[in-house]
Amino acid sequence: MPGRAEGGASRIRSRVMHFGPHLLLAALEGLVTSAVLALTALGLSLVFGVMRVVNVAHGEFFMLGAVLAWAVSTAISGHPAIGFVAALVIAPLLVGLVALVAERLVLRRLNYNPEGTIVATIGMLYIIQQLALTFYGPEARPVEPPFSYRILLPWFGYSGYKLSVVAASAILLVITWLVLTRTKIGLTMRATQYDRETAQAFGIPVERVYAGVFAVGAMLAAIAAVLIVPISQAHYLMGQDPLLLSFIVVIIGGLGSLRGTVVAAVLIGLSDGIVSMFFSPTLAKIIATLVVALVLVFRPQGLFGTTSR
Amino acid sequence: MRDASPATTYALHIGVIALLFALNFVLPDYHQGLFARIMALAVFAMGYNLLFGYVGLLSLGHAMFFSAGLYGAGLTVYHLGWGVPEAFIAGIACGALLALVIGLLALRTSGVAFMIVTMMFAQVFYLLILYFAAWTGGDQGLVIQQASRVVSIGAASFDLTDPTVRYMSALALFAVVLLITLAIVRSRFGRVLVAIRENEERTKMLGYDTVANKLVAVVASGAICAASGAAYALLFGYVGSSFASIQYSILPLLWVLLGGAATTLGPLIGTLFMYYVTDITSGFTSAYLLIVGVALILLVLFFPKGVLGSIRERWLGWLP
């Protein structure tokens, strides 16, 4: 016990000494988490917003994206950038295909009943996870980053790749926002979200919109996973944390609200990064989960959402 | 629902209990142990069924009630050296108290929000167990020694590690909970719960306090699940955080769906069947989660009423 107290004291001293740079590092790490989280949560939010389906298997689509990224990048020889770019294209497409099949075979037959689909997506979660364990194995495997440039800050060097992840995610979020608000596809999606029956009456192919949204939701998770896999390795259980964090983000941001999702992702990512650096990650998760559960209990429309339908 | 005479209903349930009693003397050692486990876990499923089947509230967090009982009993024995009966009661009390708090909060929501809220509270509970690993043993868990699992009543003492004592204890708990469930379901209170499931607004209009009734159901369900957890800790001598993980919230849902939601005997059938399926398949494949996943999807697609639910619909309308 005395040894532990001493260690704690020295840790506090070093924390005081380098507090500023430490905080900056924590904030940068948090920003990377936010970027990936925003993409993943956006997928979950789209699926819930348009289809009213709570996709519990969303984290497994994320994991599948990472595992496929590893498979594609190891199958392609040459410069790591080639393998990475190939993975960035192929892995999300394959995941989208899997999601499409799942939607066709299961969700549509359940007529998108909220409780039935939750049970069914729990089933998908177990199936995908077990198949990954069987064919990919229990090891965590890295994917080489496409480039390894380090940005030198006065206190520490920081990975250029990590910052490019933030940029890539921001670009994708803007594209999604433009598609949703400025194109005909976005209009049909919003119409379906607003009122399914009326949309159908106006000739919108609701079932096709649902299939597309489910596939796109899964693909967003897969893209996020491909981006993160050079930083955090691919593992068959890696989908659980993103699922929980995405739930948290979507609930705090207000279900189906893009702006709220992004704001909440930044908020959660940053606070997760900072709290985990100074306290135990478990404690950070406990607090975040508890706060969100209470938000859902007392403010079900989320902190930024307007009304829940 | 056609009503059978109470005599037929009680005869059926007493018959099932008698059959399980007789099986103790027939089953080979290995299956005797498996059946003791199944009966203890069927109690968990019955507690889940009370809320899911009869009130129609789908919780994704019942692992926290099970593990509240598990740890409530296990930790008092391990750290405080309590006797088995006191620890068992402590476990149930922990579960009931937790269910009261969670019920007060979670019942403010409904539908999908209720599922997510219960799942998140359960996740918090699971993480707390990991966080306080110094007391709970974290994911390694704790083993409760054989010496502290002996019940002395007067001059007689029962060793819960003895297979027959263990089987009979599990059966006793199962029988008591089965009869309690049956009594609840046949009571006025039980009918109000079903009315809430069918149409909450109408039940409210008829003058019933639906929130209070649901809260009582949550506490009863939590207490029954905690009883199962407490029994599990005391009978099998192990507490661990895996029992609090999301998987143990999904399993009772699967067992109840399989056996038939809102049937008194469905949870036993579901647990029995699923336990044997995983036990047999684990002999030649480790892909047991795959079976759980496929079973969930097939059930929800093709047999949403489960085994006994379908039987009741086709042939035995009086089945409780």
Image: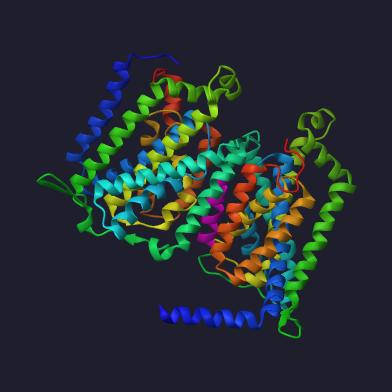
Q: Is residue B15 toward the left or the right of residue A39 in the image?
A: left
Q: How many marks?
A: 0
Residue at 32 percent of width and 43 percent of height: B40
Magenta segment includes A225: no
Q: Is residue A109 visible?
A: yes
Q: Give the vertical position of B8 relative to A86 (above or below).
A: above
Q: Which residues are magenta?
A: A121-135
At 29% from the left and 23% from the top, the residue drawn is B12
**Image location (x, y in percent) of residue A244:** 60, 54
Residue B126 placement, left or right of B151:
right
Left or right of A297, for residue B104: left
Q: Position of residue B185 (x, y in %)?
A: 40, 24
Predominant secondary structure, magenta span: helix
- Residue A120 visible? The answer is no
Front position in the image: B249 or B12: B249
Where does the image place residue B293, in percent across and percent down from the top left? 51, 46
Q: How is the image coloured?
A: rainbow
| Rendered image quadrant of residue A240 | bottom right
- Name of the residue lying farthest toward the left: B155
- In terms of image quadrants, where is residue A10? bottom right
A306 versus A32 height, above or below? above
Q: Measuring from the top left, give residue B57's x and y in whole percent.
A: 53, 34
Residue nearest the observer in this picture, B149 or B132: B132
Left or right: residue A253 versus residue A102 is right
Magenta residue check for A127: yes
